[in-house]
Amino acid sequence: MIRILTIESTCDETAAAVIGEDRQVLGAVVASQESLHERFRGVVPEVAARQHVQAMLPVIDLALAQAQCRPTDLSAVAVANTPGLAGSLLVGVSAAKALALAWDLPLISLNHLHAHVYACRIAAGVEVFPCVGFIVSGGHSNFYRCSDPLHFEYLGGTIDDAAGEAFDKVAAMLGLGFPGGPAISRAALAGDPQAFAFPRPFTQRDDPLKFSFSGLKTAVRYALYGQGRPEMDPQSLPATLVADVAASFQQAAIDCLVAKCCQAVEMTGLMTLCVGGGVAANRLLREQLQTAMDQRQVTLWIAPPELCTDNAVMGAIALEKFRAGAFAPLSLDIQPGLERQ
């Protein structure tokens, strides 16, 4: 029976899971660092890496205990080695290589973004490939043509900021805390999404699959403080203004995401769209994407909220590599940074 230990440490979540041969989750643990980074209003790479060092082995031990699994019961060790923060990746890859060597197990390397798409396969319970894969998160807003679980072709993405980063930065401007996505969504419930006519870049053009969120962030700042004026303490902003800006920003960002998803399925001719990443947990985005895909008779799979944020369960994509014999050497290195090619 196949059992694979999967490890995730690409950013600020330390996670491990044990996955069975039919994609069943035998054990899964995530150690969050949100409280550590909240006062910085964003992830601090050095802080994240140090916390991974402390949490990695306890998280792995707990995942194995949940699965009632010993090292001798495992078939392989899998780890995400790209893309991500260099220090964070290094901790996870070092742990995986050490365990694979000590336990005499094959090593499997994973692309963190491809695993986010595969989370849809886990949730669907049926085949989802071929499909358009869309990852929308704090660091990435990328499209892929996914011929099968092992072959992903990059189609396009953001030319500056990722959608999740824009949510974080706007939440900071509004004094709403970190992470920004859930905070913006809560504040937007009391606001008017049409109160501000924020820009929606690339939605009216025939450009390839591109996003740009830097101008949208600037427009929010100007709406709050005006051009050329210093920022004020966000706690002094009127509650109605905060709610309206949050709602208007959220709708503008979602309009961009939905428009490009429509373009992606039309451009590729594929009739399945799989969406993963932290921003995909946004309720309004999920609803409006569903409406848009229903109108086009495209099957939509969005990872469940618990599999949208970083986790090791989506490392079940390692099963596909295991069966294909696609193993990594113990010289496996990290590939940090963003995947934009």
Image (cartoon, rainbow, N blue to C red):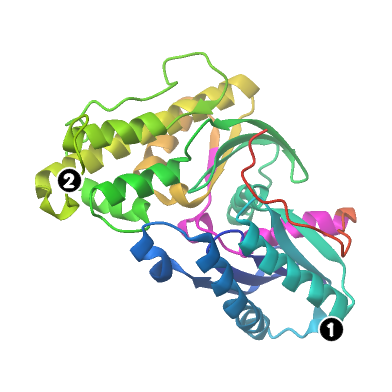
- Residue at 58 percent across and 37 percent down: it is 142
* Residue 191 occupies quadrant: top left
Q: Main secondary structure of the magenta part?
A: helix
In the image, is residue 203 above or below residue 237? Answer: above
Between 162 and 314, the one lying in front of the other is: 162
Between 307 and 83, the one lying in front of the other is: 83
* Residue 249 x/y as whole percent: 29, 37
Distance from disc 2 to disc 1, alpha carbons, whole Å, reads 55 Å
Q: Which mark is residue 242?
A: 2
Any part of residue 283 in sight: no
Foreground mark, 2 or 1, reads: 2
Seen in the image, is 294 located left or right of residue 225? Answer: right
Any part of residue 172 in sight: yes
* Residue 155 x/y as whole percent: 64, 29
* Residue 301 occupies quadrant: top right
The magenta region covers 300-323
Q: Which mark is residue 72?
A: 1
In the image, is residue 132 above or below residue 78? Answer: above
